[in-house]
Amino acid sequence: MDKQELQKTAVKVRKGILTAVHGAKAGHPGGSLSAADIFTYLYFEEMKVDPKNPKDPDRDRFVLSKGHTAPGLYSALANRGFFPVDDLPTLRHLGSYLQGHPDMKHIPGVDMSSGSLGQGLSAACGMALAGKLDNKNYRVYCLCGDGEIQEGQIWEAAMFAGARKLDNLCVIVDNNNLQIDGPVSEVCDPYPIDKKFEAFNFHVINVADGNDMDQLKKAFDEAKTVKGKPVCIVAKTLKGKGVSFMENQVGWHGKAPNDEEYATAMSDLEKLEAAL
């Protein structure tokens, strides 16, 4: 896909996020929207995956460690063809397979159940080590939140990845600077994120604008060239990106739009789409 196609796809992914959260009357739009460009780049450009064969043993793997942003992952998977886009509004509904957090047993394309913050990177390390032991060429991608990396288990996993030289592992930190209680720097300051991962023997790539497809392409291209070390991409993003009244507003971390807000948000995205 070229840049414009990726940007258009990211708008579709954002629409799916809003439709899912509005349909559920619950969920996490802010962090899903900040990571929408990352989800889009991974599933439509970077990762070797096949919607017709979601359990392909040679596929690349993805772990959503910040599992509450499942609406973003689900929208990317649906738009990529793993399941119908029309199912997105059933998010969190009784009987729907689209649960509030990713479920690998019932959702096509989900490689790891997640949601308890801090645990996903450990699972990703296990997948990456298994790939090494089995002489497989697949890569493992793990998306963490910048609030999530306050969890100690993240650093245990990072220590393991660095010690085992898991160069088939790529960690992405969605650095939107906001968590449920406010700015991450005020809740429990994780900065400097890059220096911390470097101390755990990661090759670190800083992305000034993680909502920019050109910058994401450059980062992921560089990541694939690294040998002997795991990679961490620290991507600065905007929480609520693409929806005027949600951007950089901590209140939209875990709240669904009402009908009027949903209409305004979709209108914002339609204008973005038209501009492309």
Image (tube, helix red, strand yellow):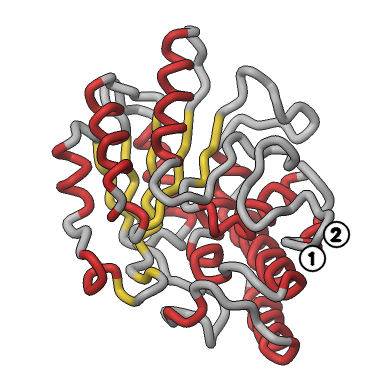
Residue 273 in sight in this render? no
Q: Are marks 1 and 2 in contact (CB under 8 Å)?
A: yes
Image coordinates of residue 81 in percent, x first then y, are: 78, 44
Q: Residue at x 20, y 64 (%)?
A: 189
Residue 89: which disc?
1
> Could you give the CA–CA distance between mark 1 and mark 2, rounded to whole angstroms?
7 Å
In the shown orientation, is residue 171 left or right of residue 12?
A: left
Residue to which mark 2 is pinned: 86
How crowded pointer 2 is (Cα within 10 Å; few <14, some 14-19, many 20+) is rated as few
The label number, if any, that marks residue 227 in the structure image: none
Q: Quadrant of residue 169?
A: top left
Left or right: residue 17 versus residue 243 is right
Q: Which quarter of the rendering shows the C terminus?
A: bottom right
The amino acid type, in three-letter code, at marker 1 is: Pro
24, above or below 133, in the image:
below
Residue appearing at x 18%, y 40% in the figure: 198
The 10 Å Cα crowd at callout 1, few under 14, some 14 to 19, many 20 or more, is many
- Estimate the x, y position of residue 190 in percent, counting from the top left: 22, 58
- Of 121 and 203, the residue lying toward us: 121
Q: Nearer the viewer, mark 1 or mark 2?
A: 1
User: Amino acid under label 2?
Assistant: Asp
